Image: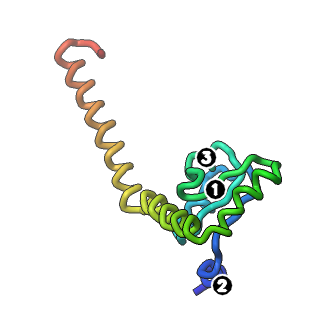
Amino acid sequence: MGRIVQGICFWRCIHLPISSETLGLVILESMASGLPVIAAKSGPTNEQVEHGVNGMLFENENIESMLEAVSVLEDPEHLDLLRRNARKEALDFAWDKTSQRLIDFYMEARNDTLLEVKLYSVEGRYV
């Protein structure tokens, strides 16, 4: 087991004070480990972290807002709820679910294309 993975077992949360997280892998991996995320608000972060539900958000470059978000560490019950919800959120992005969403997307696109071809052949034009 790597040292980082071993260390995560003792972490209470992950704190991301940057607003340039674009892909969200750090957030997703943290949530998968059962760590609530405390992060600066940004487009991608807002899509993954629901304030007070699976993590905490704060205004970028605002110390007061960050301190308020970090204060959740002082509330063991709320922190435990954030941990459980973070893990649930991450499970929605497990490979089996992600792969199924992709298959469903392709099947829908294929069905739409088949319908379009059928309509074209019946009516002699695209709809």
Secondary structure of the residue carrying tag 1 is: strand
Pointer 2 residue? 3
Name the residue that disc number 3 marks: 46
Say left or right for 99 vs 40: left
10 Å neighbourhood of mark 2: few (<14), some, or many (≥20)? few
Residue at image location 62% in from the left, 68% down from the top = 75
- Residue 56 disc label: 1
Give the numbered dot on residue 38. none
Q: Amino acid at mark 1?
A: Met
Q: Is residue 1 left or right of residue 114?
A: right
Give the Cα separation between the discs numbered 1 and 3: 10 Å
Quadrant location of the C terminus in the rendered image: top left
Q: Earlier in the sequence, mark 2 or mark 1?
A: 2
Q: Secondary structure at mark 3?
A: helix
Labels 1 and 3: the sequence-earlier one: 3
Q: Are marks 2 and 1 in contact (CB under 8 Å)?
A: no
Q: Report x, y in % for residue 76.
A: 59, 71
Q: Quadrant of residue 55?
A: bottom right
**Quadrant that contains the N terminus:** bottom right
